[in-house]
């Protein structure tokens, strides 16, 4: 059973929850830009939360299903249709064989995910299916998907009644709790106090625009220039996804999935994990604001989201059971 | 374990850094390596990545898993306690003592900044090369790119700072200098280090089970090869 890429899209890659345990060798974790969307898509299909999925931007790929499959879309909504029938995100869908999915226009969000029940049959590189484009390894042949690539998927764990029509299954994940439209919360970084008082105020009060040169490595921001109380060089040390670095020109960058493992720029803050999916979904040109929070709040927020996800999983389990018994 | 002063601070809500000051010193880095090997060996629960650097070590952990089993304490505080416990064990770990020699072709066509380094040091190119290959370097950390070794300490005379305008593309294998550090680009990349030569050896090979030639803590020495040997070895490598 397989899918074939009919049109590749802007940047279409295989991603999972990242490659962990090798950062001491400079190998960055990578993984899905919006980890929550990866988890939601997999949860809807009762896959492992970290099962590999297809990540895509707009223009999105056109994909043919050579055999029937259960799929779910999450993250960005690009107004998908299968054989001309409009299909929603965050809802499991039965796709009959020889169907084609396409994405017609942007409705909201920046990065989309397509999961297949049972997952794709690929080979791990260093314990992960994520595509590392820099070294050309992982995912599908270490590269972005292109025309005529055929990716196999494993047998769905429960055979559905064969049908020739695309079916939208009658349950939906409510994802509101996982995203925010408000200011992005961050905890102060070790070099937060390197900012002048005026710059701290600017960071907390002004808006910052996401620049076109933003990519999977980081989102570059344009805003008021921030200044430091001294310009002493720092020695390189580890950085993390969500770290807000202050560049020598006074502008900031938020490190994303493909960030370098180490860096030497001041770390003025760290976006809380619970808000990383929200920043990942913001398009170039969007304005973002920042709000200071503390570590207990950030940790509790992560726990709360994990609980939401668990509830979603239980609900999907019940629904799928009922569906199969019909 | 050797006692060093340190501070521990969060670098996000699921990572922390133990910092032993803001200097590049052999003794400090030795402490970093001790802790790195100890944390690896003892497999502290919930740690998913450990990143040693010049004078710090960072740990990425699973916040949700810690909070589920320890609901009354911050995951950060819990992890901090585990690490402090590990640091208090006065156990000396068997450290990595590998020594690796790497061939470098110090030809001007492969080391386009040789003249600049020579001018800076008021030395001949031959003297610059002699100073660079005379030293035994230590891999203090790996970062920036997969497999990129940060090695020190370069002879003071040739400690040229990074280029003010980085190159948009540095070829794979390029050997460079940035202040007291010397490094090798494992893959083609933008970069600002002063390039003095190139090695035909692959520093990062995705087809290998251990893709990285070098590891933190390795000792490295360089030996000079001719441009003919360079291309010969390069062809041999790729076949």
Image (cartoon, coloured by chain):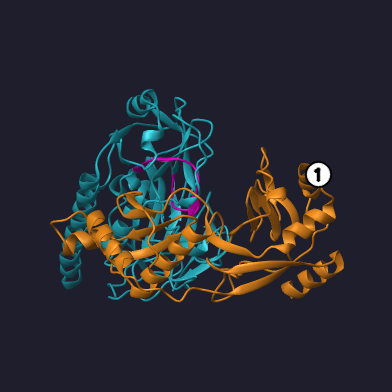
Q: Quadrant of the C terminus of chain A?
A: bottom left
B121 or A282, nearer to the observer: B121
Chain A, chosen colour in render: cyan
Q: Residue at x 67, y 48 (%)?
A: B193
Looking at this rendering, what residue extends furthest in the left direction?
B72
Q: Residue at x 19, y 52 (%)?
A: A304
A190 in magenta: no
Chain B, chosen colour in render: orange
A268 in magenta: yes
Tell whether A75 sits left or right of A142.
left
Tell whether B87 sits left or right of A300.
right
Residue B105 occupies which quadrant of the picture?
bottom right
Identify the residue position indicated by label 1 in the image.
B122
Q: Which residues are magenta?
A: A255-270
Looking at this rendering, what residue extends furthest in the top direction?
A198
Looking at this rendering, what residue extends furthest in the front direction?
B3
Badge 1 marks a residue whose secondary structure is loop
Q: How far from the left and from the top, in percent, is residue A96?
A: 37, 66
Q: Residue at x 42, y 74 (%)?
A: B93
B126 or A63, nearer to the observer: B126
Q: How far from the left and from the top, in percent, is residue A147?
A: 58, 59
Instruction: Tell me: residue B41, above or below residue A6.
Output: below
């Amino acid at each position: 059973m397989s899918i074939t890429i009919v049109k590749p899209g802007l940047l279409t890659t295989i991603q999972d929850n990242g490659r962990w345990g090798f950062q001491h060798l400079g190998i960055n974790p990578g993984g899905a830009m919006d980890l929550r969307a990866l988890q939601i898509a997999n949860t809807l299909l009762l896959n492992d939360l970290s099962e590999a999925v297809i990540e895509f931007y707009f223009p999105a790929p056109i994909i043919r299903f050579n055999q029937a499959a259960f799929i779910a879309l999450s993250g960005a909504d690009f107004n998908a249709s299968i054989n001309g029938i409009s299909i929603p995100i965050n809802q499991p869908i039965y796709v009959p064989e020889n169907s084609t999915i396409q994405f017609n226009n942007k409705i909201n969000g920046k990065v989309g995910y397509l999961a297949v029940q049972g997952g794709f049959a690929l080979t791990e590189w260093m314990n992960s299916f994520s595509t590392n484009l820099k070294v050309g390894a992982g995912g599908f042949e270490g590269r972005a998907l292109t025309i005529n690539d055929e990716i196999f998927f494993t047998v769905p764990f429960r055979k559905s009644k064969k049908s020739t029509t695309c079916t939208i299954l009658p349950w939906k994940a409510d994802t509101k709790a996982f995203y925010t439209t408000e200011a992005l919360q961050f905890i102060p970084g070790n070099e937060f106090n390197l900012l002048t008082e005026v710059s701290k105020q600017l960071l907390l009060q002004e808006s910052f625009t996401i620049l076109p040169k933003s990519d999977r490595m980081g989102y570059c921001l344009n805003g008021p220039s921030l200044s430091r109380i001294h310009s002493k060089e720092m020695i390189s040390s580890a950085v993390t996804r969500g770290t807000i670095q202050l560049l020598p020109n006074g502008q900031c960058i938020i490190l994303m999935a493909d960030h370098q493992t180490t860096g030497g720029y001041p770390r003025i803050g760290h976006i809380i994990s619970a808000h990383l999916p929200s920043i990942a979904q913001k398009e170039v040109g969007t304005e973002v604001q920042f709000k200071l929070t503390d570590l207990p709040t950030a940790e509790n927020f992560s726990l709360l989201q994990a609980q939401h996800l668990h509830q979603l999983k239980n609900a999907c389990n019940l629904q799928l059971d009922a569906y199969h018994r019909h | 374990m050797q006692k060093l002063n340190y501070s521990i601070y969060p670098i996000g809500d699921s990572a922390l850094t133990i910092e032993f000051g803001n200097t590049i010193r052999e003794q400090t880095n030795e402490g970093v390596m001790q802790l790195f090997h100890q944390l690896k060996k003892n497999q502290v629960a919930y740690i998913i990545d450990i990143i040693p650097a010049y004078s710090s070590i960072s740990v990425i952990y699973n916040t949700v898993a810690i909070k589920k089993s320890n609901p009354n304490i911050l995951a950060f505080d819990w992890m901090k306690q585990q690490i402090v416990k590990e640091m208090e064990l006065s156990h000396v770990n068997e450290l990595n003592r590998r020594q690796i020699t790497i061939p470098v072709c110090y030809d001007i066509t492969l080391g386009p900044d040789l003249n600049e380094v020579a001018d800076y040091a008021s030395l001949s190119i031959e003297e610059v090369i002699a100073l660079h290959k005379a030293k035994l370097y230590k891999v203090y950390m790996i970062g920036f790119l997969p497999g990129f070794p940060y090695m020190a300490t370069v002879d003071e005379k040739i400690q040229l700072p990074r280029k003010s305008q980085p190159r948009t593309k540095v070829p794979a294998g390029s050997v460079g200098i940035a202040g007291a550090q010397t490094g090798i680009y494992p893959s083609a990349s933008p970069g600002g280090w002063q390039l003095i030569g190139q090695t035909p050896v692959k520093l990062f090979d995705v087809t290998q089970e251990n893709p990285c030639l070098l590891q933190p803590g390795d000792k490295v020495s360089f030996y000079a090869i001719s441009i003919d040997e360079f291309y010969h070895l390069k062809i041999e490598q790729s076949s």
